[in-house]
Amino acid sequence: MNTQDTSRSKDEVIDTPHLSDAEKKKLLRIARETLTEYLTAGTIPNYTAESVEEPGLLQEVAAFVTLRRRDGELRGCIGRVEVSGPLYRTVQDCVISAATNDFRFPPVTASELDDILIEISVLSPFRPIRSPEEIQVGRHGLLIRKGFRVGLLLPQVASDRGWSRDEFLRAICLKAGLPTDAWRDADLYVFSAEVFEEEE
């Protein structure tokens, strides 16, 4: 996993990948076309680095894809923390997995496509922290590792649910299947995210 120097100030900006408006629109279009083709035909569009010319979409960075109904109900969320390919391919993998492999929900069907909105979160590198005081709720996401247990919560999750820092810490432990105070002797990382979604 890619980490950065722990000596940095908690107020220092984490280097979140920046995408232009045009790159965001194209990445959302790739996600939509991939989801549609996979659910209707069982195939995946074959984009290439040559056809995806935007440099922002060729970065090798972690990303998550969230699927929601138009009424706001969550329908699936899957991401890739450790990646070895360009962002557009990671998003293709994630949108298919979010639709078909999120164990919390039944698979998305083709009949639902018009009711589904796609949100993409492009993640910064993960920065290890030594104290929970470094966590900025609403700006930071959390990653926890303890033994074989790993859990991740995106920055917008804490904001959407109005969590305090303590609630965020308890939630990340539960996400990893750990006791709610396990963060005290686990490896904790913060990250930021560039978050964008389809227009309704």
Image (cartoon, helix red, strand yellow):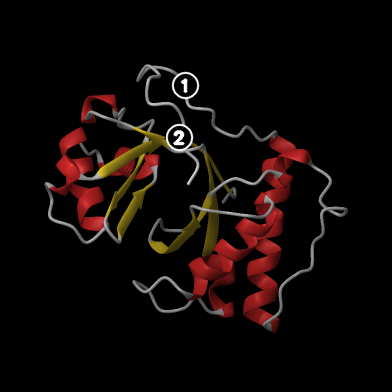
Q: In the rendered structure, which amino acid carries the disc numbered 2?
A: Ser
User: Is 70 left, or right, of 198 in this rendering?
Assistant: left
Residue in the foreground of this view, choosing between 186 and 13: 186
Query: Residue 152 placed where, x, y %?
Result: 35, 51
Query: Residue 7 placed where, x, y %?
Result: 37, 20
Residue located beneath label 2 in the image: 192
Do we see residue 69 in this rendering?
A: no
User: Is 150 left, or right, of 97 in this rendering?
Assistant: left
The CA distance from mark 1 to mark 2 is 9 Å
Residue in the foreground of this view, choosing between 41 and 58: 58
Q: Seen from this angle, which residue lies furthest bottom? A: 41
Q: Seen from this angle, which residue lies furthest right? A: 50
Residue in the foreground of this view, choosing between 164 and 197: 164
The residue that appears at 71% across and 79% down in the rendered structure is 43
Query: Residue 94 placed where, x, y %?
Result: 55, 62
Badge 2: few (under 14), some or many (20 or more) residues near its Cα, within 10 Å?
many
User: Secondary structure under badge 1?
Assistant: loop
Q: In the figure, residue 23 lies in which quadrant? A: top right
**Contact (Cβ within 8 Å) of mark 1 with mark 2:** yes
Residue located beneath label 1 in the image: 13
The residue that appears at 54% across and 28% down in the rendered structure is 15
